Amino acid sequence: MKNRSFDLTEMDLPKELKSMSYEECAKLAQVIRKKLITTVSKNGGHLSSNLGTVELTISLHRVFDSPKDKIVWDVGHQAYTHKLLTGRADKFNTIRTEGGLSGFTRPDESEHDAFVSGHSSTSISAALGIATAMKLKKDKHHTIAVLGDGALTGGESFEGLNNAGKSGTNLIIVLNYNEMSISKNVGATAKYLSTLRTKESYHKTKTAVEKVLDSTPVVGAPIKKVVRGSKNVIKDMIIHSTMFEDLGFEFVGPIDGHNIEELDEGLCAAKALGVPTVVLVNTQKGHGYPPAEANPGGYHGVGAFDLSTGNPDVVSEDSFSAIFGKKLLDIAYKDKRICAITAAMKFGTGLQYFHRALPDRFFDVGIAEQHAVTFAAGLAAGGMIPVFAVYSTFLQRSYDQLIHDLAIMDTHAVIGVDRAGIVGEDGETHQGIFDIPYLTTIPNMTIYSPSNNPELEMCLEKALLEDKGICAVRYPRGADEVRTDNRTASVDVVTHCNGSEMCILTYGRLYNEALTAQKRLLNEKEISIDIIKPVKIFPIEDSLIETLKGYKKVFIFEECYRNGSIGEKIAAKGIDCDLSAINGFVKHGKTNDLLDELGLSSFRMTEKIMRYLNEKA
């Protein structure tokens, strides 16, 4: 074995992978895992999923020729190794930091990223589209969709499978089976895949495969040698009579996802078939790092953590998510109609308490937000009170169901809109900035945006037990940061008035920024300004409009997309207001830095008000 540098910044990647021995590949995998662990421990990010796909990613880049062959990563949260192998190793320490690499795949970041990712279950549809475009252009290269079994619980995956099997394209679907999405996978699909994971192969492949393998050139001597010497092994890996074959696919697997030699064999077989093929790969989430192996859910998406102890900075007990989950359980003890629903995010949304105490009224529907809302509508039609806790960015996927299945019937359900507003390092696919613009278009909708824990509890209780129709209670990522002496408890409008002719109107997390701006203006500039904070932000109360008409100038600050914001609706009612909201998508960075850049920090509030006063003078 020749001396080879394993400095990722100096290697000629991914080209150099094709000439590496399996011993060298194993060494490279160790180097990559070390890099993943040390970087994520500092920057936060998705750890378990990336540790589980190191060997798979190495093999993909050995067998295929990116970017001519297109690799589409579902969600993209498991593509860190892919980034390291495609010319981004020297920038990898910037991942998830402002101006640095994204935590997901982005075509504007690298030609090796075939598609924007961030949401689950999109890879098959996107890859089929790319493969069809290649077929129309008579391009013989392959398109590879890489998705986990958790993503296969999403309905869009099945819609893609339904169209892809008979497409006649060079499409390969690599199904990475690890029994996890974020939480443990549930449902019939997970059970079915579990049988395939351990099923022994018993059918030989078609004789045509052997002929194709003999005539197909494979780049790299190590791969060519193992393929020509192991056709029987390849034939033994191909299972027939699966769901996927019934949909028109060839099926290869199961393959040990941490054995590069076996991965090379299986992927080469799939490549040689030249028809839509599913490759089942068994991996261990968190592989190679004992704390993540023991707690793959806890290390799925983490903040910075201590390498010496391996303790991730997971969602804290005082986070809005945890407070929501605990209060929901408290109310549900007293009212047996209340049910809790999650789309594979039990721990992320604070519903673990409900699941532990009241499992019969807890439902994890998998990564299926559309189904979750219609399922909730069915529960409501049956006399229950469903509560669907979901991240703002994922609730977007169920807009039609909110209108057609909940609102039209005017049934009562509560949506816990978690991660509302800026979420920071996860970037534009995860920023929760669109829920207000689209939720306010839906009839029979009430929206609360509490700024602290007591208000969150009060809003949830009112939404559950007093309101009708659809109620959304939205709250940000993280914990209540409002000082105790400024903490309010209301479900209506909170005012901090001292007779000023100007006021700040804001809600949710920005209330804290407004309080700081108010204090700075008074102490440093001797300028007084009132604060008005609606807690129930929609429908907009007539009394709020009348109050605002009493001010000569109203400054509105909103942590949401400008078009369709509450501020736009207030302006449409004849209020002379100066609106600061978000235009366009928001990239990744620290939340406080992003709020400042967007003009929503206390400093920017102060600056804007002073600029207005100076111009007026």
Image (spheres, grey):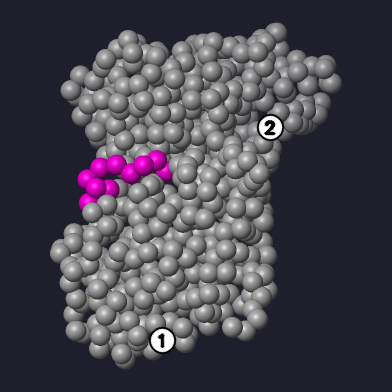
Q: Is mark 2 on a helix, strand or loop?
A: loop
Q: Which amino acid does label 2 sit on?
A: Ser
Residue under the image location 68 percent in, 32 percent down: 601
Q: Report the front residue among 555 and 364.
A: 364
Q: Specify whether residue 437 is in view.
A: no
Badge 2 vs badge 1, beta-carbon distance below 8 Å: no
77 relative to 496, above or below: below
| Quadrant where the C terminus is found in the figure | top right
Coordinates of residue 438 in the picture (x, y in percent): 41, 36
The reply to whether the magenta stretch includes residue 614 is: no
Which residue is label 1 attached to?
A: 225
- Mark 2 to mark 1 CA distance (whole Å): 61 Å
Residue under the image location 63 percent in, 23 percent down: 481
Coordinates of residue 183 in the picture (x, y in percent): 39, 40
Coordinates of residue 292 in the picture (x, y in percent): 51, 47
Q: Report the front residue among 111 and 333.
A: 333
The reply to whether the magenta stretch includes residue 189 is: yes
Q: Report the front residue among 488 and 152.
A: 152
Q: Which amino acid does label 1 sit on?
A: Lys
Region of the chain picked out in magenta, as a range: 182-192
* Left or right placement of residue 98 versus residue 111 in this view: right
Query: Dot 2, how many residues are within 10 Å of its Cα: few (below 14), some (14-19), or many (20+)?
Result: many
Coordinates of residue 415 in the picture (x, y in percent): 37, 27
* Left or right placement of residue 52 versus residue 370 in this view: right
Residue under the image location 21 percent in, 84 percent down: 208
Which residue is label 2 attached to?
A: 601
| Quadrant where the N terminus is found in the figure | bottom right
Q: Specify whether residue 62 is in view.
A: yes
